[in-house]
Amino acid sequence: DDGDFFIDRNPRYFEHILDFLRTGVAFLPTDRDEKHKLLLETEFYQISSLSQLISKQLEQETLEVQDDRIVWNSELCGRQLTLSDGNKTVEANPDITGYRVVLACMGYTSGKHRWNIHVSGTNKDIHWTCIGVATQDVRLEGNYNDGIYSCSCASQRYDTSDISGRDNRGFRYCYGDTITCELDCDLWLLRYYLNGTETGVACKLKPDGKYYPCAVLRYPGNQLRISGA
C-alpha cells in the first residue's frame, strides 16, 4: 500500500550487487562457493554484465586447477620413452631409435590454456626435440611432423604440416630453458614464451579440434618436464 517493494532474496549478496551498480567495479568474494551463490543472485536480478564477469572468473579458476595437474599420458607415449616424477617428466631411453611422441592427459577444445616445458636430462644435445600440441590420433613414432603443431629446436621453425607447412619464424631453445606454451582454443592460436619472454604467435590451428600438449624426443637422455603455468 505504501509503494515499497519487497524482494525475497538473501541480503548477504546484495552488497556486491549494489557496489557494482554504483561504481561499475566488481568486488567479488574470494571463496568459490560464495562466487557461485553471488552468480545466482546476479542472474535473478538479470545483471548480465556482472554475471558474465563472475562466470568468466569461475571458468578461469577451474582451468588453472586443471592445468596445474597436467601430466604426460602413459597410454599416449611412444616406445623407448620413460615417464617419472608422477608422469610429469618424460625421458628418452638409451636405446631410442627414432622420433618418439608423448601427449599430455588433458586435451582442450575451448578457452585459453598455458603450461611449461622445462628442458633437461643427461644429454644436452636436444636437436630435433619439438614442443607443441597435437591431436589424439597423431602417430607416436616415425615422422614427427604428422599432425603436430610444434616448434623444432634444431631448425628454429614452426612445423604446422596440417595447415600452412613449415615456417622459419621459429626460435631456438637450449638445455635448461623453460618454454611456456599458450593454446587459445577460441582464436585457434598457439603462442610461445621462452624463459618468460614472448616469442609471438607460432601458428593458427585447424578449428574445432581437440588439442593435447605434446613433445617429440629424438636422442637418448633428452628429458622434458611438464607443469602448469
Image: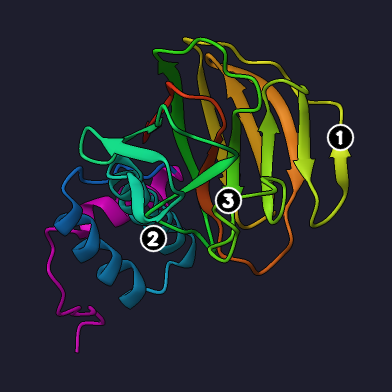
The coloring applied to the image is: rainbow
Q: Nearer the viewer, mark 1 or mark 3?
A: 3
- Depth order, front residue of 54/44: 54
In depth, the one of 149 and 26 nearer the eye is: 149
Q: Residue at x 57, y 66 (%)?
A: 137
Task: Specify the amino acid type for callout 1.
Answer: Asp
Residue at image location 53% in from the left, 46% down from the top: 101
Indicate the secondary structure of the residue bearing disc 2. helix
Structural distance between the alpha carbons of marks 2 and 1: 37 Å
- Report the Cα–Cα distance between label 3 and label 2: 41 Å
140 w.r.t. 91: above or below:
below
Q: Secondary structure at mark 3?
A: loop
Q: Eyeballing the image, is 172 above or below 64? A: above
Quarter containing the N terminus: bottom left
Q: Earlier in the sequence, mark 3 or mark 2?
A: 2
Mark 2 = which residue?
A: 55
Residue designated by label 3: 141
